[in-house]
Image (cartoon, helix red, strand yellow):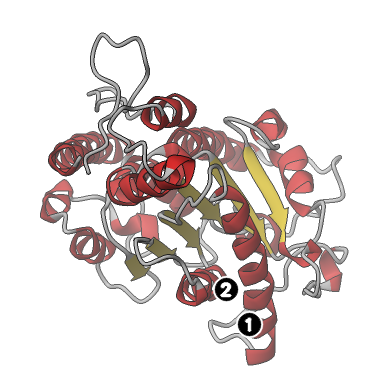
């Protein structure tokens, strides 16, 4: 059975078509109400059959809509320059009177724009963007208040906001903290190899929190299947947690779950993190629209661009020549070089997503 979306001129809102200047998503409520009332549904079987057919249709063709996409971000060294500020620069997060040096403030200005743009892009692609941290409340709030107070309005619960979830607050999960930061920052290691018990506890906490978020998000209508879940972080915890959650998921036979896990290099310098956020903001639509699962560890990749191009089936990405400084593999190039690379990446991703959406229209 083909379940059509709203037709042009019908006065209803359906899937928003790709636009050159950006990406947008249709309204889940409008689509759901329009589809549920479609005469294409058989009368026999009633609501249960309609719910089943609707869930089946969205599993295949509407997985990349904002109301079907769930995005998890780690906080420390994924969005926020934790290592640079607290380990290298030795800032005391509790001392708000400590002045930020002029050179660092200039770097932070660029980072603030990059992380803000990144989160805005994420909330345009997903109805549930979650910062999931093993730190203890209110670590994220402290970081924002101290170094980016203007961003406080980005966080919260509701449409267009980024939800902050502290994994240690999930029942049966103990907090893993370090005392030198006041007992609220997640434990970090100075080496690449984490002690197994710490890794297991951090992974278990994030796995439990992720499962709860997934179950809540994918219950917007009866028989909704899990479809499109992304996790991006600099440690194995969130990667392993997502792999566990999706592996243990026992969905209906019609369910097609796309699990997309990315591990990025840890302890980035501030300029490196900023460049990575600029890159990731442009790449995020490609991650969301990719019709398949992704498992990428960029910490061990000598060429992250090649690794991503292979995972996304995106050979045009190789021609972008994006600076490897985004993953700490080269020195940061000039601003002019970065600007041109970002322009090339913008065009490449727009074409990639446009072709992806065009292919999906044939399925629908």
Q: Quadrant of residue 294?
A: bottom left
Q: Quadrant of residue 349?
A: top left
Q: Position of residue 39 (x, y in %)?
A: 31, 27
Q: Residue at x 63, y 91 (%)?
A: 196
Q: Nearer the viewer, residue 348 or 92?
A: 348
Q: Is residue 16 left or right of residue 194?
A: left
Task: Indicate which disc residue 344 carries.
Answer: none
* Residue under pointer 1: 199
Judge whether 335 appears above or below 279 on screen: above
* Residue under pointer 2: 237
Q: Nearer the viewer, residue 294 or 14?
A: 14
Q: State the SS at label 2.
A: helix
Quadrant containing the C terminus is top left
Judge whether 206 appears above or below 103 on screen: below
Judge whether 289 appears above or below 83 on screen: above
Q: Position of residue 44 (x, y in %)?
A: 37, 42
């Amino acid at each position: 059975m083909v379940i059509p979306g709203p037709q042009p001129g019908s006065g209803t809102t359906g899937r928003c078509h790709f636009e050159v200047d950006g990406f947008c998503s249709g309204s889940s409520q409008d689509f759901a109400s329009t589809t549920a009332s479609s005469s294409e549904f058989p009368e026999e079987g009633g609501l249960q059959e309609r719910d089943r057919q609707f869930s089946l249709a969205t599993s295949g063709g509407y997985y990349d809509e904002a109301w079907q996409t769930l995005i998890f971000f780690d906080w420390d060294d994924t969005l926020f320059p934790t290592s640079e500020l607290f380990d290298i620069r030795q800032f005391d997060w509790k001392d708000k009177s400590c002045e930020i040096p002029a050179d660092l403030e200039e770097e932070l200005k660029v980072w603030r724009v990059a992380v803000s743009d990144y989160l805005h892009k994420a909330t345009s692609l997903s109805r549930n963007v979650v910062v999931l941290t093993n730190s203890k409340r209110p670590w994220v709030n402290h970081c924002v208040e101290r170094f980016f107070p203007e961003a406080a309005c980005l966080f919260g619960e509701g449409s267009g906001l980024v939800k902050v979830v502290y994994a240690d607050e999930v029942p049966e999960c103990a907090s893993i903290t370090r005392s030198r930061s006041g007992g609220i920052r997640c434990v970090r290691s100075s080496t690449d190899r984490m002690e197994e018990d710490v890794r297991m506890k951090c992974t278990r906490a994030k796995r439990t929190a992720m499962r709860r978020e997934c179950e809540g998000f994918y219950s917007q209508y009866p028989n909704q299947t899990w479809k499109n879940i992304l996790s991006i972080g600099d440690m194995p915890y969130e990667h392993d947690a997502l792999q566990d959650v999706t592996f243990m998921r026992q969905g209906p036979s019609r369910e097609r779950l796309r699990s997309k896990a990315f591990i990025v290099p840890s302890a980035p310098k501030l300029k490196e993190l900023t460049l990575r956020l600029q890159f990731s903001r442009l790449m995020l639509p490609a991650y969301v629209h990719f019709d398949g699962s992704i498992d990428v560890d960029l910490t061990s990749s000598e060429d992250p661009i090649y690794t991503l191009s292979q995972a996304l089936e995106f050979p045009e990405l190789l021609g972008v020549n994006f600076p490897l400084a985004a993953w700490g593999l080269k020195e940061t190039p000039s601003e002019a070089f970065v600007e041109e690379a970002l322009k090339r990446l913008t065009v490449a991703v727009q074409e990639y997503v446009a072709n992806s959406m065009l292919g999906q229209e044939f399925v629908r």
